[in-house]
Amino acid sequence: MGSEEVQPGIILDFDENGRLIGIEILSLV
């Protein structure tokens, strides 16, 4: 499991097999 911030405020979440399971978009306001 892990996450990677691909752009400021955008984080991709992966499961233990490296599959994309979610996207988090953080508000930068």
Image (cartoon, rainbow, N blue to C red):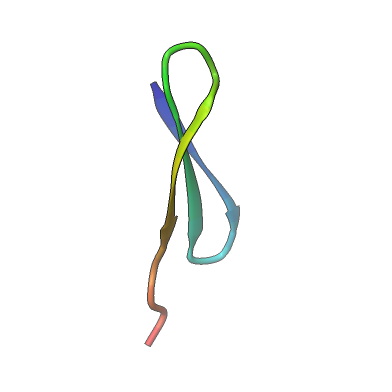
Q: Residue furthest right?
A: 6
| Side (left or right) of 24 relative to 17 | left
- Rendered location of residue 17, percent (x, y): 50, 11
Q: Is residue 2 above or below residue 5?
A: above
Q: Quadrant of the C terminus?
A: bottom left
How many dots with numbers? 0
Q: Quadrant of the N terminus?
A: top left
Q: Is residue 16 above or below residue 10?
A: above
Residue shown at the point (56%, 65%) measured from the top left: 8
| Side (left or right) of 15 relative to 4 | left
Q: Residue furthest top?
A: 17
Residue shown at the point (54%, 19%) measured from the top left: 18
Q: Is residue 16 above or below residue 20?
A: above
- Rendered location of residue 6, percent (x, y): 62, 51
Q: Residue furthest bottom?
A: 29
Quarter residue 2 falls in: top left
Q: Is residue 20 above or below residue 29?
A: above
Residue shown at the point (48%, 51%) measured from the top left: 11
| Side (left or right) of 8 relative to 1 | right
Closer-to-camera residue (23/7): 23
- Rendered location of residue 19, percent (x, y): 54, 23
